[in-house]
Amino acid sequence: MKLLVVLSRMPYPLEKGDKLRAYHLVKRLARHHEVYLFCLSDQRIQPGDEAHLRSFCKHLQVVHLPRWRILLRMVSAIFSRLPFQVGYFHHRHAQRAIDAVIDTFRPDHVMCQLVRTTEYVRHRYSLPKTLDYMDTLSKGMERRAETAPLHLRPFFRAETRRLILYENLMLDLFDHQAIISAQDRDLLYHPQREDVTVIPNGVDTEFFNPDFGQIGGHAQEKQFDLLFTGNMNYPPNIDSVLFLVHRVLPLVHALRPGTSLLIAGVDPDQRVRDLAEHNAAVTVSGWVKDIRTSYASARIFVAPMQIGTGLQNKLLEAMAMRMPCVTSDLANNAVGAVPGESILVGHQPQEYADHILRLLAEPGERDLLAANGNRFVRSAFDWDRSAERLDSLMAGTPAPVPTP
């Protein structure tokens, strides 16, 4: 099959969740199909990154979105019905480029990741199309509206309404739809949301291996007690570490002074950098060349996600690295681990603190939780199975949902 894949970002390097999902799925689809990878980019692209993608994609085109074009497009989006997230990525010069690709490549099928890219092909009614929602952007925006500063709430609420209408329209216009979790599917507002196929992420258990960082068969000494990783200019991640440092860590320090926290991830927001400036127990590393070094350096992974949608890859990676994980219901609902067995779930700050203190005090319980989490993630999350399911969906013969 000649498959055109449309992405809102270059799927490499793998520092963001949408890139990670696109990279692993496209890499596997390219084993069986002739893939034309069409990427938008608002950032400078490194030649080595393009070369890496060309190693498994037969065709690759990257269309640059200059900042001035984005600014003009966002102004014009005020007077349209498009969500701003769609307007940000939809430009005439990119539309001409993708039209030319369709006319010359003549794909048998088009796959779009996120509704941010669907405007480019929505009017190609005769062309078979699959939309990977990934997660429910409208619900994520709605949750941000609840915690945003008062002067920004009207904007977030308006964007939520636009996204709901647009997500519903795209479900009607695309032949097939996928999403990352049942929780996200159920957050869609379309009456036929049950028709959307759940295709979870996987985790590369060969790369995220608990033996990483061992010296002479023994684990390296841990430098930090707690760890949080992620794209640190992403609002749900910023909200999570602010909650952890301001509301949970003081309760931990009251009984265990000096408990340390490492926050690792690309592009830390100023509010995140300030956490390290004002608290000696907090370290903000910024971008890390090999994120496994961060996982290997800490005892417990803590992700108290309060807002956002989708599947938290950070939890899958931490469990694959055999780290004990503490998280929220919101995050674990998408993962599906058994609370108290493979993962610990907190609700209020004191509950998070109690989980952390107990795990720090009891190495045996820490090891048992980590081993259970590792077994769970290895059985439930596999990129090959997810790619097979997406392939079957595009062919019109969805495979049965695998049972962990």
Image (cartoon, rainbow, N blue to C red):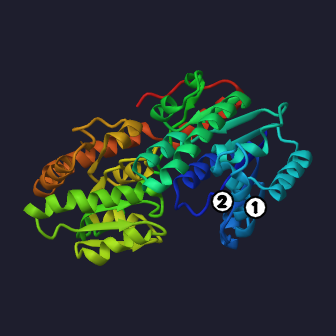
Q: Position of residue 162 (x, y in %)?
A: 62, 40
**Callout 2–callout 1 Cβ contact below 8 Å:** yes
Q: Nearer the viewer, residue 94 or 4?
A: 94
The amino acid type, in three-letter code, at marker 1 is Val
* Above/below status of 287 relative to 124: below
Choose between 252 and 299: the one closer to the eye: 252
Q: Give whichever of 219, 358 is nearer the camera.
A: 358
Identify the residue at the far right of this view: 104
Query: Where 281 sits versus 389, above or below?
Result: below
**Residue at 57%, 25% in the rendered image:** 193
Secondary structure beneath disc 1?
Answer: strand
* Percent of width and height locating residue 277: 31, 78
Residue 131 sits in which quadrant? top right
Q: CA distance from mark 2 to mark 1?
A: 8 Å
Identify the mark nearer the N-term, 2 or 1.
Answer: 2
Quadrant of the drawing holding the C terminus: top left
Furthest toward the left, the residue is 255
Q: Residue at x 67, y 49 (%)?
A: 86
Q: Position of residue 83 (x, y in %)?
A: 65, 46
From the top left corner, tell me how far across and down residue 62 is, in percent: 75, 61
Q: Which residue is mark 2?
A: 10
Residue 62, disc: 1
Residue placed at 49% from the left, 32% from the top? Answer: 187
Q: Residues within 10 Å of mark 2 (few under 14, many from 20)?
A: many
Badge 2 amino acid: Met
